[in-house]
Image (cartoon, grey):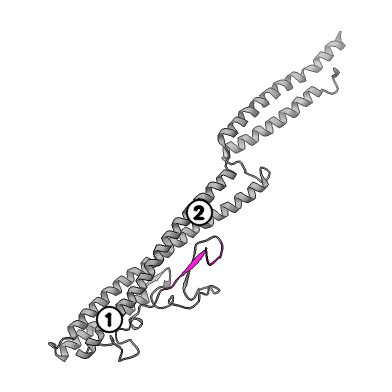
């Protein structure tokens, strides 16, 4: 290579090497400081696309867990109210048993009837008043019909959505809760048919028939509670599965996106040394034209 003062090729080569080493050093610093191997599409375009899809899936899965937990809270609210209704039905059965014996006169039996009907009215009040987040649970609104979520207020059975898509086999199922009013259970004078067992206990004969009607009411109520318990167990299993799925997806996203600190630190030290060496060589290369000037001055 000729010795010249117009073009210092050695200095240009050293400067180019310094620029490359310095850029690589800056990339290592960015990765180590952020903890991410991929912080822009330039780092790994395909990896970035996969990572963002995985992040969206993890976020949806975590929200699905919250949705399922909300559904469990809704079920527990309904079950708690049904537990109170259970107490009222037991008291009504006790009153019917009392009125069914012949040792009470008509006036005394009417007093028993008064409490009996009060218990029935309280059952209806509880059923109509029990709600979760403004959704009434035991008044029959969720007792049947196809789900319709096209309006501002959804109708029919309640849809619990927990999956990341909208596949009926994987992403949601329905909660259906039967009506638990006194008329729906067939007890009290709100029942349409006055001849139905459980309508009244004002006479000995009616009280004896009411015992059978109350048994049927208790069974109907227990079927609702059993259905809710089964759904709650199913939701708890769903939550466990969603949490495992979210954890594994997060781990996969981490392997794609996160920086390997030990490997990146090795690269950082390498580029740091190369940068220092390039700076030293650039200083030496910049001094070479002085050699040419020394020849001219002689």
* Residue 78: image tag: none
Residue at 56%, 35% (x, y): give it: 261
Question: Does 173 sit left or right of 210 as displayed?
Answer: right
Question: On the image, numbered disc 2 is attached to which residue?
Answer: 245
Secondary structure character of the magenta stretch overall: loop
Q: In the figure, 81 relative to 257: above or below?
A: below
Q: Quadrant of the C terminus?
A: top right
Residue at 19%, 82% (x, y): give it: 97
| Image spot of residue 196 (x, y percent) | 31, 89
Question: Does 296 sit left or right of 201 as displayed?
Answer: right
Q: In the figure, 263 relative to 178: above or below?
A: above
| Image spot of residue 258 (x, y percent) | 57, 42
First to last magenta residue range: 165-176
Quadrant in the picture for residue 32: top right
Question: On the image, numbered disc 1 is attached to which residue?
Answer: 214
Kindly give the residue lying farthest to the left in the view shown. 103
Secondary structure, mark 1, is helix
């Amino acid at each position: 290579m000729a010795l010249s003062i117009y073009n210092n090729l050695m200095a240009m080569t050293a400067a180019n090497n310094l620029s490359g080493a310095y850029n690589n050093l800056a990339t290592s610093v960015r990765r180590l400081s952020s903890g991410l191997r991929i912080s822009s599409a330039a780092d790994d375009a395909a990896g970035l696309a996969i990572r963002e899809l995985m992040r969206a899936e993890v976020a949806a899965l975590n929200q699905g867990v919250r949705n399922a937990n909300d559904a469990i809270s809704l079920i527990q609210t309904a079950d708690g109210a049904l537990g109170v209704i259970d107490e009222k039905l037991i008291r009504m059965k006790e009153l019917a048993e009392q009125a069914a014996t012949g040792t009470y006169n008509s006036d005394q039996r009417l007093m028993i009837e008064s409490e009996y009907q009060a218990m029935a009215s309280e059952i209806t009040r509880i059923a109509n008043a029990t709600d979760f987040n403004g959704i009434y649970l035991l008044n029959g609104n969720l007792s049947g019909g196809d789900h319709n979520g096209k309006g501002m207020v959804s109708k029919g059975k309640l849809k619990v959505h927990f999956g990341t898509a909208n596949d009926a086999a994987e992403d949601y199922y329905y909660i259906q809760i039967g009506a638990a009013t006194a008329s729906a259970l067939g007890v009290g004078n709100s029942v349409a048919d006055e001849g139905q067992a459980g309508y009244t206990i004002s006479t000995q004969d009616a009280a004896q028939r009411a015992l059978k009607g109350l048994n049927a009411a208790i069974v109907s109520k227990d079927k609702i509670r059993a259905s809710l318990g089964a759904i709650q167990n199913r939701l708890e299993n769903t939550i466990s599965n969603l949490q495992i799925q979210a954890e594994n997806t997060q781990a996969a996203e981490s392997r794609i996106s996160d920086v390997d600190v030990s490997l990146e630190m090795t690269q950082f030290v390498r580029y740091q040394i190369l940068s220092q060496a390039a700076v030293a060589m650039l200083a030496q290369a910049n001094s070479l034209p002085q050699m040419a000037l020394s020849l001219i001055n002689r």
